Amino acid sequence: LAERLQGSIQKIRGKGKVNEADVKEMMREVRLALLEADVNFKVVKSFVKQVSERAVGQEVMTSLTPGQQVIKVVKEELTELMGGEQSQIAVGKKPPTVIMMVGLQGAGKTTTAGKLAGLLRKKHNRKPLLVAADIYRPAAINQLETIGKQLSLPVFSMGDQVSPVEIAKAGIEKAKEEHHDYVLIDTAGRLHVDEELMDELKQIKELSSPDEIFLVVDSMTGQDAVTVAQNFDDALGVTGVVLTKLDGDTRGGAALSIRSVTGKPIKFVGMGEKMDALEPFHPERMASRILGMGDMLSLIEKAQTNVDEDKAKEMEKKLRTASFTLDDFLEQLGQVKQMGPLDELLKMIPGANKMKGLDNIDMDGKQLSHVEAIIQSMTVKEKEQPEIINASRRKRIARGSGRPIQEINRLLKQFEEMKKMMKQMTNAQGKGKKRGGMN
Ligand code: GDP
Ligand code: MG
């Protein structure tokens, strides 16, 4: 997708003003990106319309191409749509502040209750009490107690023979007695929204008058999450949303849909099963994630200012036809060097940071000149077919360049790594035909 975007960017660069056709072209990609990220169709439609109106006719900033300008608007609007940073938690007029966790079964209520309690104590120096009011799911009470032990936080429970409403009430009483300033009520969920569940939650709400009702939503559920959120909000009036399991490979389109359908702020995101894996919600990061760009655009910006595009294209063709030689490697290194530290660049490419062997490629100017010396000590044939470089050739190259043999070995290995990596990126991102080049 990034390539598609980039392709469009390249087509319309070099103009002074963003015109309607530019915007249309870019918005087609954006629309796809949003739909791919599982953003609600209606939300996409109105969003695209709104952005298009704003983007057309904009002066293009000198530092940006029209395409980048449009993307900038898109990102800003997405960020805006998802609200500012809202990770603060209400404080009740009279302690304890009551927080009720609601959501479907398996969404992450119990886990998030624990994480939040941990956060309240650690970051805000609070004294939270966890209340086990899910009497239906087998072992739900145990689960919360285990979490409590793990965090050294108290858990209030009354077994599964007392009604959740009673448990919530008693839990709050207990918190008052023991001077807890926060009470987190872990409630039951069902696989689907149903009347009975909602009635029970409504009763708990009535009796405990919570200061916050956090709806916990599994980000992997995509579109369904929106309906669920709507139902819970209609019945209970939630005050905030926690989006869990963002550590998975979901693009997080649910965040945008939920926010724009319910109007309720996303307060936190769950980033893993561990108790410290809860983060404040960053709308801007989410916007990038939804657009699926990683920091791809800043990478494109960087690359466009520094790399000769024709050369980049030529390199890529060579890579694909596997005629990428050590000479090309050297040239590539030189170009990459102009863009800044290689490892930093690689971090911006989604997925590339996971490939091993790359950390060794980072090099300073001195190393680069060593590499240069080594490569220049090779014969044309060796440069084109490094696999023929055997032990005696290595020795000769070492003598010629004045570099130790280990360095020659390392370089050849790096070259192979780079070749492999570039190929992987070409395959992973190209999805076939239309690749504008990663550079
Ligand atoms: P509940 O039924 O809503 O109380 O859900 P649980 O808290 O029991 O969580 C269900 C499962 O999701 C558990 O295995 C959790 O460890 C897991 N889980 C919860 N939040 C996250 C998260 O942010 N990331 C990941 N990877 N797993 C999570
Ligand atoms: Mg639970």
Image: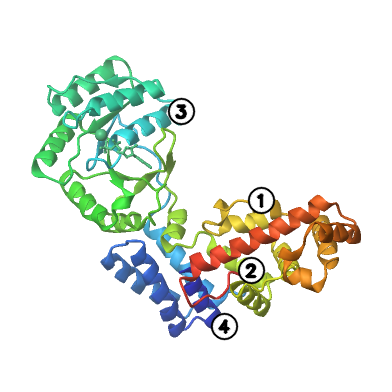
Choose the circle earlier in sequence order: 2 or 1: 2
Alpha carbon separation for disc pair 3 and 2 = 42 Å
Within 10 Å of the Cα at label 1, are there few (<14), some (14-19), or many (20+) other Cα atoms? few
Residue 130 seen in render: no
Q: Residues within 10 Å of mark 4 (few under 14, many from 20)?
A: some
- Check disc 3 and report the residue beneath it: 122
Residue type at mark 3 is: Lys
Point out the frontmost of discs 1 and 4: 1
Expressed as whole percent of the image width and height from the top left, the position of residue 13 reads 56, 80
Q: Tag 1 or tag 3, which sits nearer the N-term? A: 3
- Cβ(mark 2) to ligand 1 < 8 Å? no
Tell me which numbered mark, 2 or 4, is placed earlier along the sequence.
4
Q: How is the image coloured?
A: rainbow
For label 3, being within 8 Å of ligand 1 is answered no
Name the image quarter holding residue 93: top left
Task: Please report contact status of discs 1 and 4: CB closer than 8 Å, yes or no.
Answer: no
Cα distance between the residues tagged 2 and 1: 20 Å
| Residue located beneath label 1 in the image | 359
Instruction: Check disc 2 and report the residue beneath it.
Output: 303
- Spatial CA distance of label 1 from label 4 is 40 Å
Q: Name the quadrant of the C terminus.
A: bottom right
Q: Position of residue 56 (x, y in %)?
A: 44, 79
- Left or right, residue 432 beside residue 183: right
Circle nearer the viewer, 2 or 1: 1
Tell me: 191 left or right of 432.
left
Amino acid type, callout 4 = Gly
Q: Residues within 10 Å of mark 2 (few under 14, many from 20)?
A: many
Q: Quadrant of residue 312?
A: bottom right
Task: List the residue tagged with mark 4.
Answer: 16
Q: Amino acid at mark 1?
A: Asp
| Residue 67 at x, y percent in the picture | 51, 75
